[in-house]
Amino acid sequence: MKIVVCVKQVPATTAEKRYTPDFRLDRTSAESVINPLDEYAIEQALRLQEAGTVESVAYLGMGPEQAAEALRRALAMGGDEAYLVTDDALSGADAWATARVLAAALNKLAPDVALMGMASDDAKGSLVPGAVAAIRGLPLLSYGSELRLEGSVARIRRLNATGYDIIEAPLPVVASVTDQVGEPRYASLKGIMAAKRKPLETWSLADLGISPDELRGAALTRVVEVRPPETKAPTERIENVPPDEAATRIADWLAARKLL
Amino acid sequence: MSDAKSDANSDAKSDVFFLAEFAAGVPSHAAQELASGAASLAKQSGGSAVGLAYGEGAADGAPSLRTWGAARVLVLGTHAVPAITHAAAVASALRDGGVALLAPATPNGRDLAAATVGLLGVPAFGPARAVRFEEGGLKVEASTLQGAWVTISEPADGAPTPAVALVLAGTFTPKEGSGTAAVETAETDDGPLGAARIVETHQEGKAAVNLEEAQFIVAGGRGVGSADGFTQLQQLAEALGGAVGASRAAADAGWVPYQLQIGQTGKVVKPALYLAAGISGAIQHRVGMQTAENVVAINKDPDAPIGEFADLFVVGDLFAIIPKLTDEINRRKGA
């Protein structure tokens, strides 16, 4: 049994972010990290490997050459090998182009489970898992709070309106997991040293048999305007007053906005 | 019915599609919002609003989507199955084009939108906080990079149609009219995406109020301290006529079920009032509530980050203030 975890490099939450003059995220200006929600997918894969259910855990990333750092950090948490798809033609790739390229790389790696985080910190669409499943023609098990592999099927536990469902599909599958799978481990010093010797292969689009023409400029969407959000009125503060007065003033504030 | 006639004469390539999830024959609030949003976009594009309905009771409830503006509804399936299993039917319905597919930015809506993008190779947008049809084309406004920027996007030149847009709750307001939509049933082979099955369903407690629909939300965080502490929040929510939500810290602590979690990995809400009690306001929480119209925060820490973006920040002990606020609201409402 083999799992490939897709790992995206994103700007750190605390980093200052800006757009380039052609409205792309300036990925060189910000400190980069593994997309925090991908760390849960890594954790889930490593737990299955430790339990003996899965023999091999590999990572797949797509991005500029510096995205290899995120894959090295993933390898420091555990797992066996990593692959980075990097190509100038991928600059500015949107959900569709990203899914198209990851699907081709996953078809080449042919894992039993292609595992992803539930969303990325920067794009926030949660579109890549479903699009990859559709392109590869495989079932999707999404938003799992736990992934289990039993025989020839995969199962996830997924929240429903009041409790949870167990959803099942025959392997191979594309799956995504939430931050409820368990806190991601920290890389140990030993893990960081070991990661330096683990194989990390780089693929171009040509290696995947995709021509840049097929990607139609890497994006079917175009940003036409970027602006700061509307400035809002400054925060009103109520401080150093007894609870009675605070309650009355909150009620007055709500009433003034016709919220009562 | 003159409406139906004009709809029949409209250009199918100008139609605006939307996903409509049903439970017990009733369309979700998101479906109502998207029906009205699709109807207003369709008026500008010269087409009709077409619903793609799925879920329990979808066939029975489909005609009611006319109330919110749908001219036509295609029923994809009526059983409780993972929404993704309808992906092939959605793609099939869109093969002849259309301007846009509006999908709610919920897990099911995102899955179906994503699979459509993969199956048809069409542009994807969102999560959008506004969708407009301007100068003959679609314009999608989204908040990006943890709210630091607002972007406006459009399909690239020559991009295939329809464009798929994830739409945040509260982006469109349901407008009630009358009438009955024309209903058809999709006949599609589900294909490989149809292979996922619900094999067990576990109900835990009563159905919570749907947070995405609530106009008033009282949300508690780490500062609430216990499951008991949430009782006071529940009483305030009842006084306001709203629902209780929570931060991830409170859900992780087991004080409330995860269904109540608001934030990046929980629900994204846009109520008229968001009252945050004992919530520090980490970025992951903010992502789930930053479009609320009014934000009131009560926190004993005068430096809590939520104080920077709340409209009203009350520094004090929530356990002292909230019961008094509940009494005051009940008194003013004459309860």
Image (tube, grey):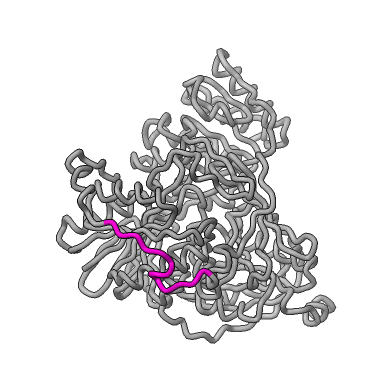
Q: How many marks?
A: 0
The reply to whether residue A225 is visible in this rendering is yes
Vertical side of B147 occupied by A8: above or below:
below
- Residue, x 45% and y 60% (percent of image)? A87
The extreme right residue here reads: B2
The verdict on residue A175 being magenta is no
From the viewer's side, name the closer residue of A81 and A254.
A81
Vertical side of A123 occupied by B137: above or below:
below
The percent position of residue A179, horizontal first and vertical second, equals: 36, 49
- Residue, x 60% and y 19% (percent of image)? A238
From the viewer's side, name the closer residue of B95 and A23.
A23
The reply to whether residue B24 is visible in this rendering is no
Quarter of the picture containing the C terminus of chain A is top right
The answer to whether residue B77 is left or right of residue B157 is: left
The percent position of residue B189, horizontal first and vertical second, equals: 48, 85
Which of the 4 image quarters holds residue A217? bottom right
Quarter of the picture containing the N terminus of chain A is bottom left
Which of the 4 image quarters holds residue A157? bottom left
The percent position of residue A141, horizontal first and vertical second, equals: 37, 66
- Residue, x 38% and y 31% (percent of image)? B225
The verdict on residue A202 being magenta is yes
The answer to whether residue B162 is left or right of residue B146 is: right
- Residue, x 36% and y 58% (percent of image)? A84
Vertical side of A74 occupied by A165: above or below:
below
Q: Which residues lie in the magenta part?
A: A200-212
The answer to whether residue B326 is left or right of residue B220 is: right
From the viewer's side, name the closer residue of A123 and A194.
A194
From the viewer's side, name the closer residue of B203 and B314.
B314
